[in-house]
Amino acid sequence: MNTSPTSFIITGGTPLQGKVRLSGAKNASYKLMIASLLGTTASTINNLPEISDVMMVAEIIRSLGGQTSTLDHGTQTINPQGLESFAIDEQYGEISRASTLFIAPLLARFGEARVPLPGGDKIGKRPLERHFEGLRKMGAVFGQEGNSLVVQAEKLVGTHYRFAKNTHTGTETMIMAAVLAKGKTVLANAAAEPEVDDLILFLNTMGARIVRTRARTIEIEGVASLEGANHTVMPDRNEAVSYACAALATRGDIVVTDARPTDLAAFLAKLTEIGAGFEITADGIRFFYQGPLQATDVETAIHPGFMTDWQPLWAVLMCHAQGQSTIHETVMQNRFQYIDVLRAMGATIKVVQPQLTAEPEQVYNFNWVDSHAADVHAIQITGPTQFRGGEFTAPDLRAGAIILIAAVSGTGQTILHNISQIERGYSQIDEKLTSLGARIQRVTA
């Protein structure tokens, strides 16, 4: 039996019970750290999750000459005053897609940015042209040297830019570029996710002038400078869904502290459809099993729709539901890498061809021209499933999490390798699940 130092050994079969507190949102945390580099003085960011993406961004900031220091559990100060380099080492592009977010603060400080082409989860192509075109309209000039992008701009100038399709990271990149640009920038068809609004709140506290005038329109008046600020990261809605699905899959009863119903509206609506129990409490949301779950169909969508990050987690829940359910992924190009693992654990899943109501380019948020014949866009699940243990490797962040949840809700013993993928986005997930009654051993040989 091959158990590496980064493996979990999971024994399934225990209903989860108790209370778990959410960490700060992964998809906001490290981006706020990068945004702090736009200030002239230090910022303090609270409720940062203890995840590898946060640690990696802190490491990049230090490599550029900035300073980071931990004041308390989940709190860091970031001081950009010592920044002396505009070049990020190519090694960081291999493990994350955060690198391009550094373009705006580096341009603002040095007039040039050299950042590695991004990696991260292998869930389809990331259409970077959606925000690079916006930066070009602001005056940025792009080139490439090896595996690094070279971006130059003496001074960015405000512009009107409409995103061809929704892009979370693209919207954040353009916001950060616009806050210190000359003049006004208007972003149309911009992302509406709450993590984007968390970034806007932070930047406005630093002295930026950003207003969301309509659901998908953001206006930014450039200012001469920004100061450091104190900010608390919003709770992680993906983590909330993860623990909710784990509780329901194990027929348990938990309270997720700090979960915000407004961030989870599409998920809660689907829980009502399948007959799952939940109630809003004074400090979060209680999720509880109240009888057999009923299969229902889900189609992912941009905010405020059903999140693509929730889709793999929902698949585990549908494996426990009675009947046939279909999951149609419209946001990411290829996000069903986990189906072979769930099949090996006992699930009945088949790939299906979705029935489209319009041309693919209008239905899908990714660029349809980038799709391949082997890409999977929809699956059908027949339940209920009794998951059984085995030995598996986490292929990416969310897929790794669902293997863990399936193992906790199943029978027998599961060995899960490459847990560093899970720890990119989940802070102390094994400890939190163990506190709820799960039996998980971390192998640290």
Image (tube, rainbow, N blue to C red):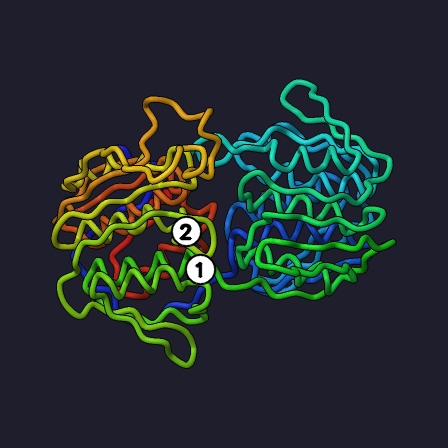
**Which residue sits furthest top?**
146
Neighbour tally class for label 2: few under 14, some 14-19, many 20 plus, Cα within 10 Å: many
Tell me which label, 2 or 1, sits earlier in the chain: 1
Q: Is residue 309 left or right of residue 47?
A: left
Residue 379: quarter of image: top left
The amino acid type, in three-letter code, at marker 1 is Arg
Residue 372 coordinates in the image, percent (x, y): 38, 23
**Which residue sits furthest front?**
358
Q: Quadrant of the N terminus?
A: top left
* Residue at the spot 68% in from the left edge and 31% down from the top edge: 115
Q: Which residue is mark 1?
A: 237
Q: Which mark is residue 393?
A: none
Residue 290 vs 30, above or below: the answer is: below
Q: Is residue 428 left or right of residue 250?
A: right
Element type at mark 1: helix
Q: Is residue 387 left or right of residue 261?
A: left
Query: How many labels, in total?
Result: 2
Q: Which residue is mark 2?
A: 307
Q: Determine the CA span between mark 2 and mark 1.
A: 10 Å
* Residue at the spot 77% in from the left edge and 33% down from the top edge: 140
**Which residue sits furthest bottom?**
282
* Residue at the spot 73% in from the left edge and 26% down from the top edge: 142
Residue closer to the observer: 141 or 73:
141
Element type at mark 2: loop
Judged by depth in the image, the label closer to the viewer, 2 or 1, is 2
The amino acid type, in three-letter code, at marker 2 is Met
Residue 35 vs 75, above or below: the answer is: above
